[in-house]
Image (spheres, helix red, strand yellow):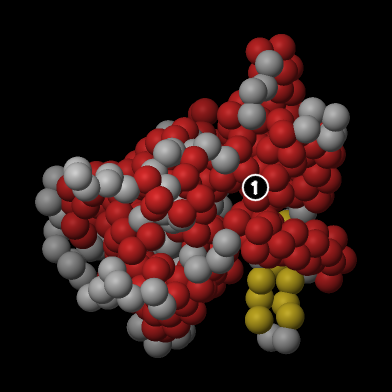
Amino acid sequence: MQSRLDKSPVATWWWTIDRWFLAAFLSLMGLGIVLSFAASPAVAQRIGLDSFHFATRQIIFTIPALGVMLAVSFLESRQIRRMALAMLCIALVLMVAVLYIGVEVKGARRWVSLAGVSLQPSEFLKPAFVIICAWLFAEHKRQPDIPGNLFAMLLLALVISLLVAQPDFGQTMLVLGTWGVMFFMAGLPWLWIIALGAAGVGGVFAAYTVFPHVAGRIDRFMTGEGDTFQVDMGRDALINGGWFGVGPGEGTVKRVIPDSHADFVYSVAGEEFGLIMCFFIMTIFAFIVLRGLGTALKEQDDFTRYAVGGLVTVFGLQSVINMAVNLQLMPAKGMTLPFISYGGSSQIAIAISMGMVLALTRKRPEKRKQLGFAPSQRAMPAE
């Protein structure tokens, strides 16, 4: 335990960090490892790998993800902005490269291989995009003559264009929804809300018309016809588990789910540990989002308010989409469950995002001064 008199960087970090956030993130990382041991052996055996291949790799991914999250949490707001700008530029270049040299999977190009390591640039784009848009919104509010909102719209158009070109409809909707929430926090007029809502509906209709795979998923969801094997098995796994589950390692339905270690790990949690575990996982995600939005509303600094609000929104929306697909409340979409689903790019990118949340919500002296609690305002003893 660090003493409050210790002024070292680590001690200062410990006394200023939001430990509720930190505990929630560590809990999700731990659950990710536990559920990987439950969900991945059947998948590994099916494709001729060692039973614990994916579980071992999940641990390997989690260790640097934890290190990255803690390292980012030490940064100041200015350093966060600089880091985000560099990430944004690199991610945009890689997303253009993906269209030409990316690995094609099921008709989409979303991955690029660099030095033998596969990366999904869109995962790293999301936190950088949120931070830069938050800065642009904040600058416009601070000085209305700065066209920050216009630049944020242009950046949104560029990002959406690159995502649609891959195509990645799920990430497109995720980015649009997050940007809309941030714009609303920045004082979006109701006319804009109506216009953006109409544009969103039009975008969904256009995607249904233009992209056959999007139309197929929506049609299968609405009619129940076609290849619905994986989502049906995910539902059956949840039903088989009941309230308290069949026990660790005892699941049977999970063995036939192709992506049980990735997109459908939530269903495996339900089968082996029961709906109680599903509610517990849902509660952790809800806690992070609600605490993040509550903290953002109390912030005096506009940039911090928009950035924290945007980061927890994208985190929450992604988790909602994944859980909704598992519960057959949404059409199937390859969206990971943050910190829990298998995936190296996703783990590292989410760790960067949540490291930014930890950094921006730290209790710094300038925040105390804004609230009227400067160190010099101590009560003087009575004479």
Q: Which residue is the site of mark 1?
A: 130
Query: Which picture quadrant has residue 100?
Result: bottom right
Marker count (numbered):
1
Query: Which picture quadrant has residue 348?
Result: bottom right
Looking at the picture, how far across and down is residue 268, in whole percent? 30, 58
Q: Nearer the viewer, residue 76 or 28?
A: 76
Image side of residue 10 versus residue 97, left or right:
left
Quarter placement of the C terminus: top left
Relative to 70, is 135 above or below? above
Looking at the picture, how far across and down is residue 31, in whole percent? 30, 64
Let me know if residue 105 appears in the view: no
Query: Which picture quadrant has residue 87?
Result: bottom right
Relative to 229, is 194 above or below? above
Q: Nearer the viewer, residue 277 or 30?
A: 30
Please name the residue shown 35% across and 83% down the image: 51
Q: Nearer the viewer, residue 135 or 97?
A: 135
Mark 1 is surrounded, within 10 Å at the Cα level, by few (under 14), some (14 to 19) or many (20 or more) other residues, namely many
Image side of residue 376 versus residue 202, left or right:
left
Please name the residue shown 14% across and 63% down the image: 247
Residue positioned most to the front: 383
Relative to 207, is 128 above or below? below
Looking at the picture, how far across and down is residue 238, in whole percent? 27, 48
Kind of residue at badge 1: Val
Let me know if residue 138 appears in the view: yes
Looking at the picture, how far across and down is residue 155, in whole percent? 80, 44
Relative to 57, is 133 above or below? above
Please name the residue shown 52% across and 28% down the image: 222
Please name the residue shown 66% across and 43% down the image: 134
